[in-house]
Image: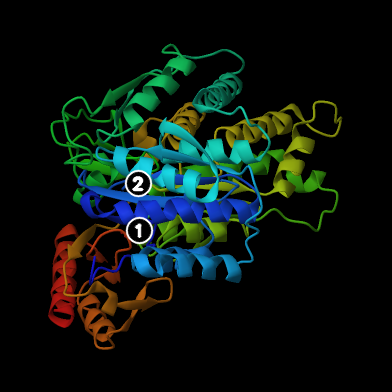
Amino acid sequence: PDNVRVSYGTAGFRGNASGMEYVFFRMGMLAALRSKLKEAAIGVMVTASHNPEHDNGVKLIDPQGEMLAQSWESLATALANVTNDQLIEQLKQIIDSQKIPLSNTSFSFYCKRLQVSNEVVCNKTTFANASAFGATCHDHGLLTTPQLHYILACYNGGDIKVDEEHYYQNYASAFKALLNVVSLCKLNPVTSPVTVDCANGVGAAKLTKLAERIGANIIDIVVYNDGQSGKLNENCGADYVKVQQRAPAGLNMEPFHRYASFDGDADRLIYYTLDSDCNFILLDGDKIAALFATYIRDNLKKVNIEKNSVSASINLRLGIIQTAYANGNSTNFLINQQNIEIACTPTGVKYLHEKALTFDIGVYFEANGHGTVSFSLFYLKRLQKGESAFDPNKSAEERFAAKKLKLFLDIINQTVGDAMCDLLAVEAILQDKNWSVKEWYRIYTELPNRQAKVQVADRRIIETGDAERKVILPSMLQPAIDELVRKYPSGRSFVRPSGTEDVVRVYAEANTQENADDLAQQVSLAVYNIGG
Ligand code: G16
């Protein structure tokens, strides 16, 4: 349409489903071209993730299950925005500039659908590829986003028969194996259930299947918001719970029970509970990252991997990657009390993932619950040595810790943040540590914080730097924020244009909830006054 410009944002294209057909159609073409270039299958994920039901979205997945290379995001944006008259010319430009061998044949890609009103666009996507570029299309039907990443990575890794069942079998057995080890070779039933709000999305049916493969005697999962009645992501789901800092509508909570929420496509996970005074306690991506990283670090200490290294001079680097949304107290806790290295990137798991790969063990989580862990090959090799039963230099404790680390690695979906795998990982760690949710949330206390959204005339006038912690343009905005922040003890605030919604996001934290709310409101007002 005239005057409409779309862009490949934080996680692909998003918008009202009714106006997105041409974007899907063209992304189908681009996926086929990328498939020819990479000589591998490319994923096409149809979802608007945490956005409301009337929205839809599309993103491409690269061969190893990673996000589309950033250099291709601008090609995607250009292709999506040309007029029909310019389309062929634009495709030719992409083919020439990327030196795409059009004669390459037999490359397939995966396509899936998630939300209502996707059938038509999805079919167009596959049709475009099949007819215009000769690609073979595999429609995997309804999957969570991380499942598609996983299946694609396995397929391109040579397992051409991989399917959804393979995913369940893989993670169910990894979870059972880890529990088997942590409970000293006998399968302990998990003592208390975990209630999971699935945001009325695809995760409900998938989590039920995964739980069935694990067995009710081992994990007790109660699915809430399974899509039978409520609307997708409406008053429920990880984004709602995190931003509103309250339970999904209609959920009657009990103190110290474990609750979790997925988002609509099940790539985000957060936990929450009530304390004895019925205060709402959130255990978000920061707390999950802290749990994972300290668990890995503590077991690494026991394995004493360095002693077993071929070269004692090579150290394993463990790091946590956060964004500006990470709570100030989580960063303090990790750096000052746990002595764990921290890195900060802009919002978008693609940035965190990239940074995580620079560590041997990169634990990355956005505060919104989107994250996973990446492990280097070097780490894997060290672990294999560490768990070897035949090395007389190792104690039983060392081998035991190495075994746990190896099995923990197996329940992680390294391709992308995966709510189901992350849930299994949290449950396994709590089981191993014999922790209730209470011990977990007490590892540090969050600074009170507030997130807000502001609608302005054009959010693209805001440009940020320093991993989105500072506003560069408009130039008068950052001094205004700095002045407001100075008024509040432990105050911190930043603003950034969203890459998935037409809003400017505002984050504020301070010593009290009242001050955090106040600061968020003042900064929102400054954004509105300057942005119009
Ligand atoms: C996507 C991205 C996340 C990002 C979120 C919000 O999540 O994958 O990395 O944090 O959007 O982005 P923004 O603040 O730019 O709107 P999802 O779960 O919607 O795919």
Q: Please tell me which of labels 2 and 1 falls first in the chain.
A: 2
- Relative to the observer, which residue lies in front, 192 or 416? 416
Task: Point out the residue furthest to the bottom here.
Answer: 475
Q: Eyeballing the image, is 99 above or below 398?
A: below
Residue 56 percent coordinates (x, y): 28, 48
Q: Within 10 angstroms of label 1, few (less than 14), some, or many (20 or more) residues?
A: many
- The C terminus lies in which quarter of the figure? bottom left
Total marks drawn? 2
Circle 1: element type: loop
Answer with the quarter of the image where residue 248 lies.
Answer: top left
Q: Residue at x 53, y 13 (%)?
A: 187
Any part of residue 452 in sight: yes
Return the residue at label 1.
Answer: 327
Which quadrant of the render holds ligand 1? bottom left
Q: Eyeballing the image, is 458 above or below 447?
A: below
Any part of residue 340 in sight: no
Q: Residue at x 28, y 82 (%)?
A: 478
Return the residue at label 2.
Answer: 284
